[in-house]
Amino acid sequence: MRYLPLTDADRADMLSVIGAASIDDLFVDVPAEARLTDKIAGLPDHASELAVERHMAALARKNLSAGEVPFFLGAGAYKHHVPASVDHLIQRGEFLTAYTPYQPEIAQGTLQVLFEFQTQVARLLGCDVANASMYDGSTACWEAIVMARRITKRGKALLSSGLHPHYVSVADTMAKFTGDALVHEAPTLDAATDIDALIASIDKDTSCVVVQYPDILGRIADLTPLADAAHAAGALLVAVVTEPVALGACRAPGHMGADIVVGEGQSIGVGLQFGGPYLGLFACKQKYVRQMPGRLCGETLDAAGKRGFVLTLSTREQHIRREKATSNICTNSGLCALAFSIHMTLLGEKGLRELAALNHGLAVQAADRLSQVPGVTLVNDSFFNEFTLILTKDAREVVRNLADKGVLAGVSLGRLFPAAPQIGKGLVVAVTETVTAQDIEALAAALQEELA
Amino acid sequence: MSMLKEGRPTAPVPVKEAHMAPTTATGNRALMLEEALIFEIGSTDTTGVDFAEAPKVASRLGSLARTDSIGLPGLSEQETVRHYTRLSRQNYAIDLGLFPLGSCTMKHNPRLNEKVARMPGFADIHPLQPQSTVQGALGVINELAFWLIDLTGMHGVAMTPKAGAHGELCGLLCIRAALEARGDARSVILVPESAHGTNPATAAFCGYKVEDIPATPDGRVDLDALKARLGPDVAAVMITNPNTCGLFERDMKLISDAVHAAGAFVYCDGANFNAIVGRVRPGDLGIDAMHINLHKTFSTPHGGGGPGSGPVVLSEALSPFGPLPYTARMADGTIHLIEEDNVGEEMPNSFGRMSAFHGQMGMFTRALTYILSHGADGLRQVSGDAVLNANYILRSLEDVLDAPFGPSGPCMHEALFSDKGLADGFTTLDIAKGLIDEGFHPMTMYFPLVVHGAMLVEPTETESKGALDQFIMALRSLAERARAGDEALKGAPYHAPRRRLDETLAARKPILTWTDPALAEAAE
């Protein structure tokens, strides 16, 4: 077996050092009735690299990849071009096959990357500090709600109707067990967001208001009044960003008063990958740093006085605090954080602004063109690279039919909000730099034919 | 001295004395290169990416256009490649050598797995594409789920948890949902002292009170003490098997029977499943839920701290409560993704969704590739060689390092030593840092907590005998130095990119982001 270096002669030598007759004898502590005497049933024996690659390639070919067709899906995961050097660099074995940097003297590579990543994320989101990443945006969002409970000692979170429904589901799942009360409704297909309604709902029991920016329908709104209202009532504002490229063009939530800003970092450096692994972003105001979940990297000095980096404030964490930890999170999304950081370094502020401008420009062109299709109405009056259309029939069916014609048209609100049939004709369309003018025409033509 | 015809010396002058190497003007030491932060070498006007010009359109951003300077430095592609390549060389990694971090399972990461995960059919598909366009991806999830069930002898599997700790959460949510479904509110979870910190943290996160289970002198769960504590308030027992002392819980089936008789559930932390894969099925031991760290047993890369992936295998009693979404193979051979949209009456008791999409697809492709590459014979050899290597280390070093459970029999996949016998003032930390100078990553130190100055050594099955012998030689030398009180050891490491780092300073005055020194000075 090509991955196992021991020879039979090695095994015999080693067994004689140990004083055992066979490898099976080393499993003496396993009761005989629980020990399999033969290989596991059903699974074939080892296979050549070629044979396995063939099997997996056959499965891969059964998928329609985003690059093959006009592609407009977003709603929490975005197709962006990732420069070739990003994937090359994350495959350096010293990054790919390293562990969590528990021994900082020989992990300065990973640690410096995390320190740079934390700074990049904090600046992008407009916050003082950011952690070294979470699993994904949805779990980061829940952790923010729990953190707000710890800070305010209140247990009612108001979730905007514009928050990604899967993020709401994750919070719902957890809240059943923690006793947090979550207030949430499905969105309405209006140009205005629900900020005014949220402001009116804040009361003395509210721990936090959670608002997505841009929201699930692609709408953007100034969060300042919401932050002011939350703070006046002693609550926190949690902002959720599922498309961080937007912050190359749009004001940062942290600069509009958000106390905690979380997000999905997949857009920058991490491919679509059918939903994972992704990259949870987590940032907040300096004063809340000791309530943060997850790993933090900090600057320090070594015994010779040189600058170096270590994991720090670990007294918040499970391996030290056990049941008193701020979270049970252990692994984060290190390699995805590395990819994000490399991509962001390649972009720099100049590139990020150009990328954002290109996304927005193409999205405006697409929104204008698609609005001309008979039977299509644009919901948004403001958006970044994603907007919502109302069609004349259930968008789920339209998406399926267009997929059969080789156009991946967007995400239907019916799939996202199955319990809200009143918005089932809504279609969320994302337009990134990967979309061409021909793609937009193809979608317009296919929609026109479908809705005729 | 030999010379070329031109008179250039071709052999060095022999070094006569061991002296400190002179410092260099740059701070570099030949191939060991210092690297500044991107904030110190980049600029906000530099970019390594070229874009087409944006269409000229009227902005739809309203009043929300970002006008402040974001402060994100850029580098050209060449500088970017060099920055990260230089940083990478300051890391130890399994690609460089044996990485004996106990309980973390640092084994070789086959590169076919990387290649497969990058096939466009897997890497470039959106989680919300119509199901007809992602049948291959759903097939991967379904096929991996099948083999995980087969290998563990369990009834079902939840594929969406994002990492081991997230899997623990999934398992406990299933248990809590199952208890609530029968109207049986219970408040306590029992956890052995030797457990990973995630176990009590997860239980607390789910709203449970955590109580310790005592251990026997031979490092295992005290069955009698456990039986005495079981009662109507105990929801579950969380047990790691093989445990973090590197020992198989011989009484596992008896523990499960006692727990079940008391109306509670058995959660198994499957972090160490790699020690028994292909040889023992947790389903045969009465386990109700167990997460599998795909990055441990099935060798998806650790990536400097994730991403992980933690599918949870479930017993028949718990399967109905597992999370959405999940895959199901239909009679016509198509595979359905069952989510809120189409779950209907199929799984009324599901506790719901625990992450946005369908789990760590990029890890599933790698893990499935690993399983198919190894096959039934290979996986049995994986656990066999992992246990053989650990016992070889245990028996090769127990004369110089105290092995608290060594006399009680063979270990499983990891060998546990303590700091007993080291000279006064010498610690596990000194040996760990000494290993760095010897060119190895240290073992896990000070864990498990039940052994003083614990050193937990897990070589894994992907090490050759030559690599093991070199490691044993290095650790033996360090143990002898620490027993003899060699003061030089307390300064180690000497040869790493950094000397020992001041963690107290880092925590006392945390610097978590970079600040321009000029701005910081102006602010003061």
Image (cartoon, coloured by chain):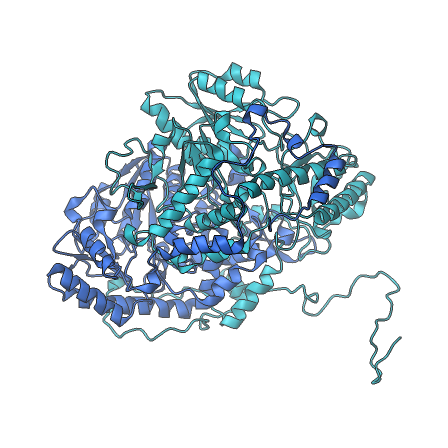
Chain colours: A blue, B cyan
Report x, y in % for residue B404: 70, 29
Residue nearest the viewer, comparing B472 with A376: B472
Residue beneath the point at 45% across and 71% down? B47
In the image, taking residue B378 as reference, residue A287 lies left or right, namely left
In the image, taking residue B394 as reference, residue A248 lies left or right, namely left
**Quadrant in which the N terminus of chain B is drawn:** bottom right
Q: Quick check: can you spot residue B160?
A: yes
Figure label count: 0
Above or below for A263 versus B227:
below
In the image, taking residue B280 as reference, residue B345 lies left or right, namely left
Report x, y in % for residue A190: 16, 53
* Quarter of the view holding residue B244: top right
Above or below for B93 versus A445:
above
Q: Quick check: can you spot residue B454?
A: no
User: Farthest residue in the bottom direction?
Assistant: B6
Residue beneath the point at 56% across and 36% down? B272
Report x, y in % for residue A257: 34, 52
In the image, taking residue A192 as reference, residue B324 lies left or right, namely right
Residue nearest the viewer, comparing A403 with A208: A403
Residue nearest the viewer, comparing A415 with B192: A415
Report x, y in % for residue B255: 52, 21
